[in-house]
Amino acid sequence: MGLLVLFGLGGYFIGMRSPGMGKAASTQGAEVSASPTNNSTLIEELKASLKARPDDPEVMVHLGDAYFDLKQFNEAVTYYKMALAKKPNDAEIFNDIGLSVHYLGNSPEGLRYVEEGLKKNPYHQRVWLTKGFILAYGMGDLEGARAAWEKARTLNPESQVGKAASEFLAQFNKK
């Protein structure tokens, strides 16, 4: 798991990412600091890896993560969907697609992906956190967001995701 990243007072949330969050995993498994230059190089390495291993969903997810880090959400969705075709029950991939689609300006569709991820794994803490984020920031449903964040916190209050849910709840309880 990566780190929770918040940008600005508006709560711009990137989320608990797989190895690409804020850091993108290289093809050798090393971590590389996210920057446009590093990610461009990483993307080329990952594309070469994908040519060599065209059925490897992990490489596809890493490509999606690298594009996500660059805020190139259309490209991220493309690779996440390729990975989902290989791993159709992976709640994490549904989460990544949902968050990317949300950032593309289609929160209702993003929420549909997140809901599908919860059908695959109703105990996936990060998906609950993302659901709350999309409900609050994309759809203006603060009550629904609170319920989702409560669920995320309840699943494991001491984890990074549980603590992030608590922070979101504290922020919105002040309003």
Image (tube, rainbow, N blue to C red):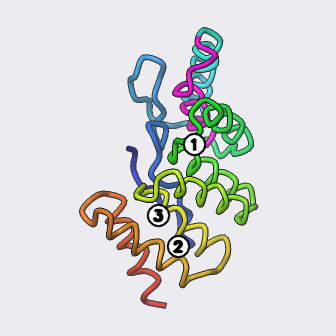
Q: Is residue 72 left or right of residue 56?
A: right
Which quadrant of the view contains residue 165?
A: bottom left
Q: Is residue 126 left or right of residue 112?
A: left
Q: Kindly identify which residue carries mark 3.
A: 129
Q: Is residue 42 above or below residue 108?
A: above
Question: How far separated are the C-alphas under marks 3 and 1?
Answer: 19 Å
Element at badge 2? Answer: loop
**Quadrant of the frame with the N terminus:** top left
Disc on the earlier residue, 3 or 1: 1
Q: Which mark is residue 9?
A: 2
Q: Is residue 22 above or below residue 50?
A: below
Question: How far separated are the C-alphas under marks 2 and 3?
Answer: 18 Å
Q: Is residue 161 left or right of residue 88?
A: left
Query: Residue flagged by tag 2: what amino acid is it?
Result: Leu
* Callout 2 touching callout 3 (CB < 8 Å): no
Q: Which residues are magenta?
A: 53-69
Q: Is residue 140 magenta?
A: no
Q: Which mark is residue 69?
A: 1
Q: Residues within 10 Å of mark 1 (few under 14, many from 20)?
A: many
Q: Which is closer to the viewer, label 2 or label 1?
A: 1
Disc on the earlier residue, 2 or 1: 2
Question: How far separated are the C-alphas under marks 2 and 1?
Answer: 20 Å
